[in-house]
Image (cartoon, rainbow, N blue to C red):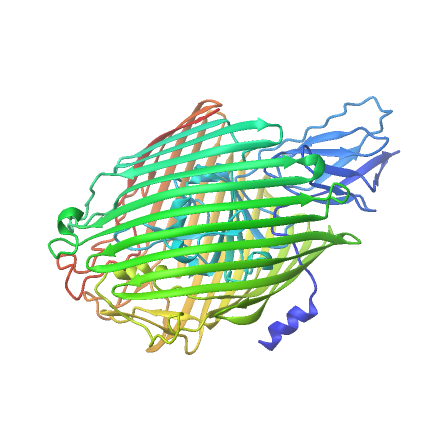
C-alpha cells in the first residue's frame, strides 16, 4: 500500500482518454523543411482547434462529427485535409504567392478497430463499422469480434450475455454512455440489451484504471459508447433482421435539420421472439419469449461561432420476457407448481442534458455540464420466487478544461454529484437503500508531443455509506519510436455491491440465499475496494510489406475487500466479506495485420489467473477459463464485406451441483461466427450470417430439469451456448 502511495506522490503526469491526432507543420525554405509556429488548426464547422508550438507540433482531438481539418496561417494558403486515420500528420504550408492548389486531400480508410500509439491510456476505439460485423442488435452482442472484452453466458434461461474484462464481471467495469454512467445498479444484468447496436456511433474501451473524471467505481476498465449525433447522422436508416430461431427486429432512424444550428433524431427499435425452441429436449425454453420497444429522441444545438454545443436526450423503453418450461402459461400456471415459469417486466425512462462551451479566443479552455435522470422499474418472478426492484437515479457533473502556459501542460477539474434510491423486494423481504455521493477531482496532463506523456489524477468523494476517501489514477506512456509505445497504469476503485441485482440468476435455482445478519441498508457487507495496475506494449512493423502490429497487455487487480459470492456448495449461495486474498491476473498477446488494403487479420491469446479465498480455502474463480484464443478475418470491398471469427474457450471449473457434488472440469470448445454482406448500391445492404455455426451446445445446462421445484434445481451453471447455432438474414437502407 505504501509503495503505491509513494508512486503516486512521485509521478506528476496525466492524459486524455479520447483519441487524438498528432502532427507537425513545416514550411519549405530552400531544400529544408522548417517548423512553423503559430499555425491555427481546427475542425471545419467547430471551435475545436489547436496551435503549433515552436517546433511546429500540434495535437488535436479526433472528432466523429467531421473529418475536415483546416490549416490556416497569415501569408499562406488555407489547406483543408480530409483525415480518416489517426496516424501522424506531416503537413507543409504553401505561400500565397505560390501557384499551387489551395486544398490538399489526405484520405485513407479508417480501421474499424484502432489502438493508438499516441494516447496515454490503453484505449481501443471501435467504430460503427465493427458493430455491423455480427448480429449486433444490442450492445451485449457487439463484442463478439473484439478480443478486449470477453462474453460469457449468464444462465440457461434468459439468453443474456455478460461481458468481462481481465477475468472480472461487468460490475467492476465502468460502462457509460457519452461519459454518463449508464449500466449500473438495477440495469447491471440486462442493461446492455437495452441499447440497440445501430444507435451506436463508436465505442472506447479502456483497459486498466480509467480517468478520475467519470467517477470512482471503475476497477478493471471503462466502456464508453457514443450515440449517433443528430448533426452528422443519416436522414433515414432502416434495419430489418430475422433469425431462423424466431427473432425479429426493426431499427428505424430519422433526422430533421430545423435550422443550421438545431437538429433532431428519432430512433425506434422493436424486437420480439415468439418461437418456442427446445433443441436439447429438457422441456425448458432454450431462449425466452420476448418483446421490446425502445424509442430515443435526441436534439443537438451547435453554435460554432460562439463556442456552444448542447444535447438533450429522452428515451423510453419497455421489455418483457417469458422463460422457463415450454408448457408454462402465465395466465394459468403463475404461482403454482404445475410448470416452472418466469416473467421479467422492465420499464425504463432516461433523460439527459449536456452543455459545452469552448472559448472562441482560447480553444483549449472549455466548460462542460451534464445532468442525467433515469428510472428503472423491474417486476419479476422466478418460479415461486419474487424479485422486484425500482431504481431512481440522478447524476450531475461540471468539467473545466484548460492549459498551463502551453498545450504540453493540461488540466481537468470538476465536480460529480450522484443520487441513487433503491427499493427491492427479495422473496418476502424488502430492502430500501439510498446512496448519495459528492466528488471533486483534479487531473494534470503532461504531453511532450514526442516521447513522454503522463497523467496523474486524484479525486475526493464523500459517500453516505463509504464515508470520505481518495481515488488516485496514474497513466504513463513512453514512445520509443513512432510505432513502438509502452504504457503503464495504476489506480484504485470502490463500489457498494448490489448483491441481488448483480446476481439475479440465483433466483432461478433452489439454492438458499445466505447473507450476514443485516445491520444496515448495505446488506451488512463492507464496500468493495481494489487496486489495478499493469502495462501495455504496442509494436508496429511491416511484415512482408504489410502494416502489422504486436501488442502485450499485462494487468493485475488486487482486492482490499470484496463481497464474495460463494457457490461452492450445491444447495446454497452465500455472500460475505473477503477474509484473505482475491486477485485477477490477465495477460493478452495480440497480433494485427493488414494482409491487403481490404483484408485484415486479428489474433489474440488471453491467459487468466483469477483466485480468491473462500471460507473453505483458496479456489480458482468458477466458470472462468484460464485460456482463450481469438481470431478474426475481415474483408471490406466495394460490393462485398466478409467477416469470420473463431473463439476458443479453455477448460474451466464448475462449482458443486447435485449432479457433481465435488464440482467438475469442463472440456474446451470453440465457436465460429460468420457474416457476408452484399452492397448493391451505396444506400442498400443485404446480409446473411451465422453465430455458433458449428452448433456447439452445453450438455444438460439445467440441473434437475425434471424436478424444477425440488431442492436440486439449478440453471446458473452455464459455460457454453444453450440454443446452438443461429442463422439470420437482414437488410439495411441508408439515405
Residue 110: percent from left, percent from top: 57, 36
> Furthest-right residue in view?
30
Residue 87: percent from left, percent from top: 65, 41
Q: Is residue 163 left or right of residue 537?
A: left
Residue 68: percent from left, percent from top: 66, 32
Q: Is residue 331 left or right of residue 127?
A: left
For the question of whether residue 661 can be seen, the reply is yes
- The residue sitting at 36% across, 41% down in the picture is 673
For the question of whether residue 166 can be seen, the reply is no
| Along the viewing direction, whichever of 609 and 411 lies nearer the viewer | 411
Q: Is residue 384 left or right of residue 241?
A: left
Residue 239: percent from left, percent from top: 40, 31
| Above-or-below relation of 248 to 515 | above
| Above-or-below relation of 80 to 720 | above
- The residue sitting at 28% across, 57% down in the picture is 718
Q: Is residue 179 left or right of residue 67?
A: left
Image quadrant containing the N terminus: bottom right
Amino acid at each position: 500500500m505504501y509503495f503505491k502511495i509513494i508512486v503516486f506522490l512521485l509521478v506528476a503526469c496525466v492524459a486524455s482518454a479520447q483519441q487524438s491526432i498528432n502532427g507537425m507543420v513545416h514550411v519549405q525554405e530552400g531544400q529544408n523543411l522548417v517548423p512553423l509556429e503559430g499555425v491555427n488548426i481546427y475542425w471545419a464547422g467547430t471551435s475545436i482547434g489547436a496551435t503549433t508550438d515552436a517546433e511546429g507540433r500540434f495535437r488535436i482531438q479526433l472528432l466523429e462529427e467531421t473529418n475536415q481539418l483546416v490549416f490556416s496561417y497569415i501569408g499562406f494558403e488555407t489547406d483543408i485535409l480530409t483525415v480518416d486515420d489517426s496516424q501522424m500528420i506531416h503537413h507543409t504550408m504553401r505561400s500565397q504567392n505560390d501557384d499551387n492548389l489551395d486544398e490538399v486531400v489526405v484520405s485513407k480508410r479508417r480501421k474499424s478497430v484502432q489502438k493508438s500509439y499516441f494516447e496515454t491510456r490503453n484505449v481501443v476505439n471501435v467504430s460503427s463499422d465493427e458493430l455491423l460485423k455480427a448480429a449486433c442488435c444490442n450492445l451485449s452482442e457487439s463484442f463478439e469480434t473484439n478480443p478486449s472484452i470477453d462474453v460469457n453466458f449468464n444462465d440457461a434461461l434468459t439468453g443474456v450475455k455478460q461481458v468481462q474484462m481481465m477475468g472480472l464481471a461487468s460490475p467492476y467495469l465502468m460502462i457509460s454512455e457519452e461519459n454518463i454512467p449508464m449500466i449500473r445498479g438495477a440495469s447491471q444484468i440486462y442493461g446492455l440489451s437495452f441499447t440497440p447496436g445501430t444507435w451506436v456511433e463508436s465505442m472506447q474501451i479502456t483497459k486498466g484504471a480509467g480517468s478520475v473524471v467519470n467517477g470512482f467505481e471503475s476497477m478493471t476498465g471503462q466502456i464508453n459508447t457514443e450515440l449517433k449525433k443528430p448533426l452528422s447522422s443519416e436522414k433515414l436508416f432502416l434495419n430489418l433482421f430475422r433469425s431462423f430461431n424466431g427473432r425479429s427486429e426493426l431499427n428505424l432512424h430519422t433526422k430533421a435539420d430545423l435550422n443550421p444550428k438545431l437538429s433532431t433524431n428519432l430512433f425506434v427499435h422493436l424486437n420480439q421472439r415468439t418461437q418456442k425452441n427446445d433443441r436439447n429436449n429438457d422441456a425448458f425454453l432454450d431462449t425466452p419469449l420476448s418483446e421490446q420497444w425502445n424509442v430515443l429522441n435526441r436534439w443537438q444545438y451547435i453554435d460554432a461561432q460562439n463556442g456552444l454545443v448542447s444535447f438533450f436526450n429522452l428515451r423510453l423503453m419497455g421489455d418483457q420476457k417469458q422463460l422457463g418450461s415450454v408448457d408454462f402459461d402465465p395466465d394459468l400456471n403463475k404461482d403454482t407448481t404445475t410448470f416452472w415459469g418466469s416473467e421479467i417486466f422492465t420499464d425504463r425512462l432516461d433523460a439527459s442534458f449536456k452543455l459545452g462551451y469552448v472559448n472562441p479566443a482560447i480553444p483549449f479552455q472549455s466548460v462542460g455540464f451534464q445532468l442525467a435522470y433515469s428510472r428503472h422499474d423491474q417486476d419479476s418472478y422466478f418460479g415461486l420466487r419474487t424479485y422486484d426492484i425500482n431504481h431512481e437515479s440522478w447524476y450531475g457533473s461540471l468539467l473545466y478544461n484548460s492549459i498551463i502556459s502551453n498545450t504540453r501542460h493540461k488540466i481537468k477539474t470538476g465536480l460529480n454529484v450522484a443520487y441513487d434510491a433503491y427499493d427491492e423486494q427479495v422473496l418476502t423481504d424488502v430492502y430500501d437503500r439510498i446512496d448519495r455521493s459528492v466528488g471533486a477531482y483534479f487531473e494534470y496532463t503532461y504531453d511532450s508531443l514526442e516521447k513522454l506523456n503522463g497523467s496523474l489524477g486524484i479525486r475526493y468523494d464523500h459517500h453516505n455509506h463509504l464515508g470520505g476517501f481518495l481515488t488516485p489514477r496514474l497513466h504513463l506512456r513512453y514512445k520509443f519510436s513512432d510505432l513502438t509505445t509502452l504504457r503503464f497504469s495504476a489506480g484504485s476503485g470502490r463500489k457498494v455491491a448490489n448483491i441481488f441485482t448483480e446476481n439475479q440468476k440465483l433466483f432461478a435455482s433452489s439454492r438458499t440465499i445466505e447473507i450476514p445478519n443485516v445491520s444496515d441498508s448495505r446488506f451488512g457487507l463492507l464496500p468493495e475496494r481494489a487496486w489495478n495496475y499493469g502495462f501495455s506494449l504496442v509494436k508496429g512493423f511491416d511484415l512482408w510489406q504489410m502494416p502489422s502490429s504486436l501488442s502485450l497487455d499485462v494487468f493485475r487487480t488486487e482486492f482490499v475487500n470484496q463481497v464474495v459470492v460463494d457457490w461452492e456448495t450445491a444447495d446454497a449461495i452465500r455472500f460475505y466479506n473477503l477474509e484473505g486474498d482475491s486477485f485477477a491476473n490477465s495477460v493478452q498477446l495480440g497480433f494485427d495485420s493488414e494482409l491487403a488494403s481490404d483484408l485484415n487479420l486479428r489474433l489474440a491469446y488471453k491467459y487468466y489467473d483469477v483466485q480468491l479465498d473462500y471460507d473453505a480455502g483458496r479456489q480458482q474463480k468458477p466458470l472462468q477459463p484460464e485460456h482463450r484464443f481469438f481470431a478474426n478475418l475481415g474483408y471490406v470491398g466495394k460490393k462485398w464485406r466478409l467477416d469470420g471469427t473463431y473463439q476458443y474457450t479453455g477448460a474451466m471449473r464448475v462449482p458443486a451441483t447435485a449432479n457433481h457434488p465435488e464440482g467438475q472440469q469442463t472440456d474446451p470448445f470453440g465457436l465460429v461466427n460468420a457474416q457476408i454482406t452484399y452492397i448493391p448500391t451505396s444506400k442498400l445492404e443485404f446480409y446473411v450470417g451465422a453465430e455458433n455455426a458449428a452448433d456447439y451446445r452445453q450438455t444438460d445446462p439445467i440441473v434437475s430439469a425434471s424436478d424444477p421445484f425440488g431442492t436440486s434445481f439449478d440453471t446458473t451453471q452455464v459455460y457454453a451456448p444453450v440454443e446452438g447455432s443461429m442463422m439470420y438474414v437482414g437488410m439495411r437502407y441508408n439515405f
